[in-house]
Image (cartoon, helix red, strand yellow):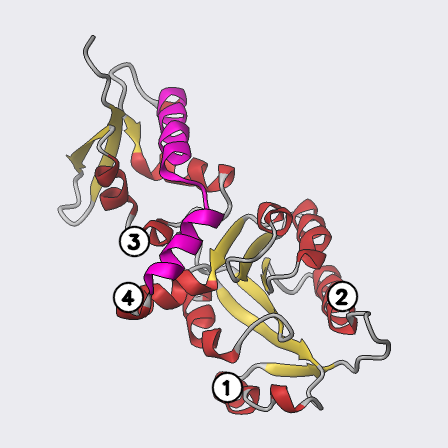
Amino acid sequence: MDNNNDKTLAVLIDADNVSDKFIKFILDEISNHGTPTIKRIYGDWTKPQMASWKTVLLENSITPIQQYSYTTGKNATDAALIIDAMDILYSGSVEGFCIVSSDSDFTKLAARLRESGMYVLGMGEKKTPTPFISACEQFKYLEVLAGAANPKKETEGTKQQSKANMAGRVKIVKTIKAIVDESSDDDGWAYLGEVGKRLNKRFPDFDTRNYGYNKLTPFVASLKEFDIQSRKTDNPNVVFKYIRTIHKKR
């Protein structure tokens, strides 16, 4: 998780690509990363299928932005969201953006916002194309957020789909080993918090919840390739975790 959770964020939701059933999980997760000062959702609200959003928007103070579909085959909603994002960027009123969509059309937008020094958090379903995920600083899967809140409802099929779209454990282990090697002291120990930050930079969609763990420490412990050491501080409530690769004896 991002520790700088006091950032002001503009939350822009593509209603064409997001179900209203995810809204609670979206807003709960956003609160871990910053404060949403702007909350807008884009779609053609004249369509009957959008009616389920009405109560959700009122309860969560999300502003609906009407965008008619002027031409068949053209996504006017995407264009409206992108234009608003750039207007907000130039207004200088926020420190980051949360773009909620499973559409690769927002790849360039995410990249452009990051070029301007903005923090960009992406959220979408597991079908989200890799380019959009990679363009974000962090990316969260909506099914995983919902599954973490309701673990009994997560089906085996969902877990298998999750594994298909996320970095596998073998790749994660290899990357952690490389990070530990790069950042460790003379005895091979590296600060776990720093390892987690670097891991997130290499895999924007990395989240221990993707693998069934709420915290980084138990996830790393489950990998069995690493030793974990706890170090006390002057504050009895604060303990630092360090990690070291276990080298097999020849």
Please tell me which of labels 3 and 1 falls first in the chain.
Answer: 1
Residue beneath disc 1: 56
Which of the two residues, 5 or 164, is positioned nearer the viewer here?
164
Q: Cα distance, mark 2 to mark 1?
A: 26 Å
- Which amino acid lies under the numbered mark 2 shown in the image of this protein? Asp
Checking the image for residue 212, the label placed there is: 3
Please tell me which of labels 4 and 2 falls first in the chain.
Answer: 2
- For the point 25% across and 32% down, the residue is 242
- Disc 3 residue crowd, few under 14, some 14–19, many 20+, Cα 10 Å: some
Q: Cα distance, mark 1 to mark 4?
A: 23 Å
Residue beneath disc 2: 87
Q: Is residue 210 visible?
A: yes
Classify mark 1: helix, strand or loop.
Answer: helix
- For the point 30% across and 19% down, the residue is 185
Furthest toward the top, the residue is: 250
Magenta stretch: give its range: 155-182
Q: Cα distance, mark 2 to mark 3?
A: 39 Å
Please tell me which of labels 2 and 1 falls first in the chain.
Answer: 1
Q: Cα distance, mark 4 to mark 2?
A: 39 Å
- Main secondary-structure element of the magenta-colored stretch: helix
Mark 1 vs mark 4, foreground winner is 4
Q: Cα distance, mark 3 to mark 1?
A: 28 Å
- Disc 1 residue crowd, few under 14, some 14–19, many 20+, Cα 10 Å: some
The C terminus: image quadrant: top left
Classify mark 2: helix, strand or loop.
Answer: helix
Mark 2 vs mark 3, foreground winner is 3
Checking the image for residue 151, the label placed there is: 4
- For the point 63% across and 77% down, the residue is 41
- For the point 71% across and 64% down, the residue is 85
